[in-house]
């Protein structure tokens, strides 16, 4: 079982029985749902609404892409807040738990689940209102040790996310970069591919740990 002060290791801590442990962890559930609620608040952040024509308002029934939905804690919160959701995850053991949760939803039609790689999304262009990713985006470079390979992959993924988002589309990413260098290459992948925004940390001086990227199409 993953300890509270340890980050899960991808993919080993999400496979087989570990997926069951993850899904049954009350601490993990609280943490994921709290981060999702924060991400919803950040969607409407005043700094992203700096221009009236770029603004979005609460109450609209947005279609949100939940990147790395895992066992469905984030998707549950998004559905409860009135959004339609497409949940994406690459791990069958994790998304199976989300399918089980879907059976208990009153509005089952508001949740679609797809087993897929975040880097190669089977999503048409210009159909997604917003994207939220909770505690998973830093895993998309798994298996890429070379700096150039990481930069190329991140850039291509950010470019495609830009294509699938509608005109006023926004992305809120909650993730755990290991240091400032890793944070920088993730952030630049978006800035160099048609996004603008800023980051939020609990402590502005922190070198690693929980970080939110608040982005919108520029």
Image: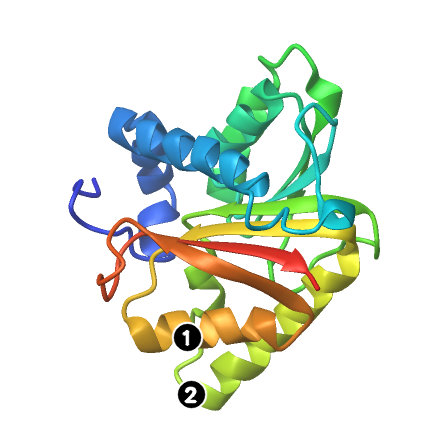
Seen at 32% across and 27% down, the residue is 30
Seen at 39% across and 53% down, the residue is 200
Please determine whether, in this image, residue 218 is positioned above or below residue 164: below
Question: Which comes sooner in the sequence, label 2 or label 1?
Answer: 2
Find disc 1 in the rendering and name its residue.
Answer: 184
Location of residue 216 by image quarter: bottom right
Find disc 2 in the rendering and name its residue.
Answer: 146
Dot 1: few (<14), some (14–19), or many (≥20) neighbours within 10 Å? Answer: few
Seen at 45% across and 77% down, the residue is 185
Quarter of the image that includes the N terminus: top left
Query: For numbered disc 2, what is the local secondary structure?
Result: loop
Quarter of the image that includes the C terminus: bottom right
Which circle, 2 or 1, is nearer the viewer?
1
Dot 2: few (<14), some (14–19), or many (≥20) neighbours within 10 Å? Answer: few
Seen at 58% across and 82% down, the residue is 152
Residue 7, position as x, y percentages in the image: 25, 52
Is 205 left, or right, of 100 in this rendering?
Answer: left
| In the foreground, 168 or 152 | 168
Is 57 left, or right, of 153 in this rendering?
Answer: right
Query: For numbered disc 1, what is the local secondary structure?
Result: helix
| In the foreground, 74 or 142 | 74
| In the foreground, 82 or 118 | 82
* Disc marking residue 196: none
Residue 119, position as x, y percentages in the image: 61, 65
Residue 120, position as x, y percentages in the image: 67, 64
Residue 168, position as x, y percentages in the image: 75, 50
What is the distance, in whole Å, between disc 2 and disc 1 at their CAs? 16 Å
Q: How many marks?
A: 2
């Amino acid at each position: 079982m993953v300890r509270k002060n340890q980050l899960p290791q991808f993919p080993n801590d999400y496979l087989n029985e570990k997926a069951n442990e993850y899904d049954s962890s009350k601490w993990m559930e609280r943490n994921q749902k709290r981060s999702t609620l924060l991400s919803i608040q950040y969607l409407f952040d005043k700094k992203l609404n700096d221009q009236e024509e770029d603004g979005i308002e609460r109450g609209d029934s947005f279609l949100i892409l939940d990147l790395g939905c895992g066992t469905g804690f984030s998707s549950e919160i998004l559905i409860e807040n009135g959004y339609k959701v497409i949940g994406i995850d690459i791990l069958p053991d994790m998304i199976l738990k989300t399918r089980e949760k879907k059976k208990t939803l009153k509005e089952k039609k508001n949740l679609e689940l797809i087993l897929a790689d975040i880097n190669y999304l089977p999503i048409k262009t210009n159909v997604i209102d917003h994207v939220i990713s909770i505690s998973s985006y830093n895993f998309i470079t798994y298996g890429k040790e070379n700096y150039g390979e990481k930069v190329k992959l991140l850039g291509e993924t950010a470019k495609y996310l830009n294509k699938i988002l509608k005109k006023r589309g926004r992305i809120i990413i909650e993730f755990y970069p290991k240091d400032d260098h890793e944070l920088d290459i993730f952030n630049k992948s978006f800035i160099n591919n048609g996004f603008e925004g800023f980051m939020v940390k609990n402590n502005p001086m922190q070198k690693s740990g929980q970080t939110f990227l608040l982005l919108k199409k520029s």
